[in-house]
């Protein structure tokens, strides 16, 4: 009889446990501590400024301290707590979100957004985007040759006896050294990072061809650089978006009005040349 009573007591305890477990509320998701830290920096930034900024612009402005996606999350935190307000628009077919203090007058807001639209319509035109890409490819091609590379493929999905057929993508360059070392390059003359899926795909393509991956870009997050390094490759950064001669006035306006990291370049930045040359010397076995 006692054993039956004990068993019932145990059952009640178990039943109580499940009832308690089912009624316990889910814990609230906590924001990323890094995003919280970034939001504090952004709060200070906006406390001293009255003009609106679009989110991609802020990502570039804070990229040496925070990944772009961290800055984006930080902005969202400030919107959610009411410190910032968002205003959406479309520029050259691209959806744009500007953020600003809630007390910013409509007149000031519209003045700055319209000024940004006039510049960005020029910058984001298909013709301008193609011109920037072609220009940086020409600078990279010259630097490859200066470091002893023979360019064996341009915008190619073939190398030696292999052809990439998994997707329609290609590599901007495949280049070889005299000792048999070969690299596959992706060149990106853009303000945002190369998209994650595209980055991973280009790594996969280089691995398929048996070449070292090199990402020649204005800016990359450190984890992308590390992934390229793990594949025996190189993250080749230029810091500024490159424009050809004749665009000095446009670059000046983009720097002054939008804080864009842009520059007229006739060759790659000296520090970028130096770092790439050091890496190439290791491939050549030169100390």
Image: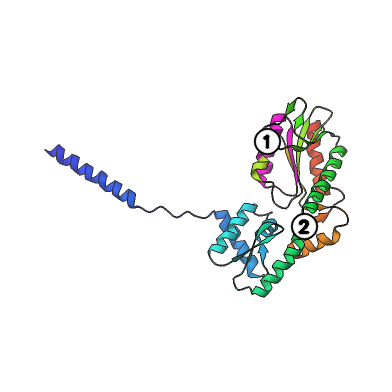
The answer to if 242 sits in the magenta stretch is: no
Residue in the picture at 87% in, 41% down:
142
Magenta stretch, residue numbers = 200-228
Question: Would you place residue 262 above or below residue 116 in this image?
Answer: above
Residue 43 figure quarter:
bottom right
Residue picked out by circle 1: 167
Whether residue 19 sits left or right of residue 245 in the image: it is left
Residue picked out by circle 2: 123
Q: Quadrant of the N terminus?
A: top left
Q: Disc 1 versus disc 2: distance between alpha carbons? A: 29 Å
Can you see residue 40?
Answer: yes
Whether residue 134 sits left or right of residue 63 in the image: it is right
**How many labels were placed on the picture?**
2
Can you see residue 231?
Answer: no
Locate residue 154, reporting x and y percent. 81, 37
The answer to if 212 sits in the magenta stretch is: yes
Question: Would you place residue 225 above or below residue 58 in this image?
Answer: above
Whether residue 239 sits left or right of residue 86 in the image: it is right
For this rendering, which residue is in front, 234 or 264?
264
Q: Quadrant of the C terminus?
A: top right
Locate residue 185, reporting x and y percent. 76, 38
Locate residue 14, reporting x and y percent. 26, 44
Residue lying furthest left in this view? 1
Residue 264 figure quarter:
bottom right
Mark 2: secondary structure:
helix
For this rendering, which residue is in front, 128 or 16?
128
Locate residue 153, reporting x and y percent. 81, 34
Tell me the crowding category of disc 2: few under 14, some 14 to 19, or many 20 or more residues within 10 angstroms, Cα based. Answer: some
């Amino acid at each position: 009889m006692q054993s039956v009573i004990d068993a019932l007591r145990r059952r009640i305890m178990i039943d109580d446990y499940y009832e308690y477990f089912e009624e316990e509320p889910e814990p609230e998701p906590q924001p990323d501590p890094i995003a919280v830290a970034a939001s504090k920096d952004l709060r200070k930034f906006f406390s001293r400024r009255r003009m609106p900024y679009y989110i991609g612009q802020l990502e570039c402005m804070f990229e040496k301290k925070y990944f772009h996606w961290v800055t984006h999350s930080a902005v969202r935190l400030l919107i959610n707590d009411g410190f910032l307000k968002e205003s959406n628009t479309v520029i050259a077919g691209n959806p744009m979100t500007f953020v600003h203090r809630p007390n910013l007058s409509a007149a000031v807001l519209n003045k700055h957004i319209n000024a940004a639209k006039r510049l960005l319509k020029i910058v984001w035109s298909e013709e301008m985007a193609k011109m920037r890409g072609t220009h940086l490819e020409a600078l990279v091609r010259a630097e490859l040759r200066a470091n002893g590379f023979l360019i064996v493929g341009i915008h190619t999905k073939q190398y030696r006896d292999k052809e990439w057929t998994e997707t329609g993508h290609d590599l901007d360059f495949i280049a070889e050294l005299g000792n048999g070392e070969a690299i596959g390059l992706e060149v990106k003359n853009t303000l945002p990072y190369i998209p994650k899926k595209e980055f991973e795909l280009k790594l996969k393509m280089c691995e398929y061809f048996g070449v070292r991956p090199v990402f020649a870009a204005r800016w990359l997050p450190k984890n992308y650089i590390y992934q390229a390094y793990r594949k025996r490759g190189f993250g080749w950064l230029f810091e500024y978006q490159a424009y050809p001669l004749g665009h000095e006035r446009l670059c000046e306006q983009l720097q002054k009005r939008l804080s864009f990291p842009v520059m007229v370049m006739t060759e790659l930045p000296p520090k970028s040349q130096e770092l790439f040359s050091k890496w190439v010397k290791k491939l050549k076995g030169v100390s």
